[in-house]
Amino acid sequence: MAPLSQTRDQTAARVSADEAGAASAPVVVTIRRSTLLRPAVALLAKELRTEFRTRELLATTLVFVLMVLVLFSFTFDPTAAETRRFAPGLLWLALLFAGSLMLHPSFTREQANDTLAALRLAPIEPVAILAAKIAANLCFLLLAELMLLPIFAALYNLSLLPVIGRLVVVLFLGTLGLATIGTVFSAVSAQARMRELLLPLLLLPLMAPALIASAEATVGLFDDSAALSPVWTTFLAAFDVMFLTVTWLFGEYLLEE
Amino acid sequence: MAHSMATSTLSTREVARAGTDGLATLGVAALLAVAGYCALFVAPTERTMGLIQRIFYFHVPSAWTGFVAFLISFIASIAYLRVRSPKWDWLAVSSAEIGVAFMTVMLVTGPIWAKPVWGIWWTWDARLTSTFVLWALYVCYLLLRTLIDDPERRGVVSAVFNTFAAFDIPLVYFSIWFFRTQHPQPVIGDGGSLDPRMLRVLLLCWAALLGVFVLLLRQRYRVEALRHRVAELQISAAREEDER
């Protein structure tokens, strides 16, 4: 059992310890240890459970991206030799559009029963709420992407197998950025009028550097060298780290009442 | 009686303020005139591009002033998130709005120069594109503000967006080095080949535009403060109505 002195810098925990007396020391230690990680994991489980009961987000994302990819093929001639040049860009654009529409429910979903207020009242770090939602959205988007990849490869006549490992790295890095910014700004748009229009408006310009980097990195995988571009991969990783940090520093302001 | 006295003291203060404003405006107008004269007649004509290059003295300082405006807006947003005084929010929105105006000037003068020199109005070069994205980010910031009614929510939410936008800008600008670029490389600093006279005129033009920026910022900030005051008066009037 950890000594009470561990809670020295936790004002809230100390207050509850003073109120309840030394007997509650184990409880206090539990609160201290788990204001970020454990609630985040619990919330992630909750997000995943909610989604997998209906699978509505996943299904709509899949159908939406497929439709966009098919419609793109009407505006270009996908049989041309240039396919390998523009297909990755189309895929990322379709994913970005999908993200800007599908990430919208992450926070509006909580509004129906005002469950966000309950989450805010819980003795957890506000960042845990955001982190759980980012992780959940990352899971949904990655899952949808993995299901889409074979269809995308077939439609645009690309061979995936030689580059699949490197492609998953690019998909992960690009999608992490999309999930981070998309989740944060779904919290913003949930508080505004015209919310359905607002999320794409905020997301698309912010995602521009990541879109360029993801598309360029993916194009690099499908050209003759099939190499993972170190510049664009590092850029994507830097993008993710930067916005995860900014979310960690400033995201909690969005959850205030 | 008390009412009329209050009005008269207020108007004295306003007269004094109008005096300072008038002097400042005159000063900036004079500076603009000198800068314009130098840009058109004092600076040497560029060897290959000719006269059209003189738009550079308006284009580049507008961009720099826009960057300064966005930087002020970003700092004010951070300060608002920390301190929560509405004044920081007023400063953030005022500066962002004027920044968008200066960036619009830059985005309009750029193609006017590019058409005769490059032969095209626009190219999807990294620097052009990234500056366009930067402009779009702050247009979105201003749009976002119109869609939230509660002043405190509006302040917090738009300040967070401003922070994200500000962190996006370096990423957008790093991409200059990753992409091949058609835009003239910066001519100031290491390896620059700018004539010293051209540089002096450029800095003079920038000083003039910064003066315009400060004047506009003062006015715009005052408008924001007055809007806040009107909203307060409307609330207290509605409350009095309710009490009656």
Image (cartoon, coloured by chain):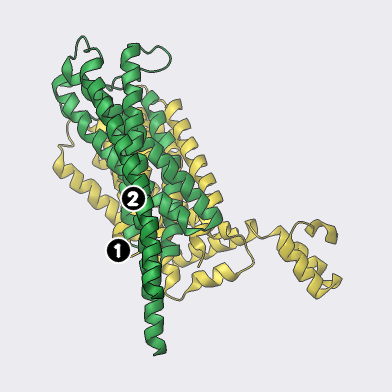
Chain colours: A yellow, B green
Write down the chain letter for disc 2.
B
Q: Amino acid at mark 1?
A: Met
Q: Residues within 10 Å of mark 2 (few under 14, many from 20)?
A: few
- Give coordinates of residue A197: x percent, y percent: 29, 58
Tag shown at residue A133: none
Task: Spot the residue most to the top.
Answer: B47
Task: Find numbered disc 1 in the image and state the secondary structure of the residue it sits on.
Answer: loop
Instruction: Determine the CA span between mark 2 and mark 1.
Output: 40 Å
- Give coordinates of residue B91: x percent, y percent: 42, 50
Tag shown at residue A194: 1
Both labels 2 and 1 in a single chain: no
Q: Nearer the viewer, mark 2 or mark 1?
A: 2
Q: Nearer the viewer, residue A47 or B192?
A: B192
Asked if the residues shown at circle 2 and circle 1 are in contact, with their CB atoms under 8 angstroms apart, the answer is: no
Task: Find numbered disc 2 in the image and state the secondary structure of the residue it sits on.
Answer: helix
- Give coordinates of residue A23: x percent, y percent: 85, 72
> According to the image, label 2 marks what residue?
B18
Write down the chain letter for disc 1.
A
Q: Amino acid at mark 2?
A: Ala
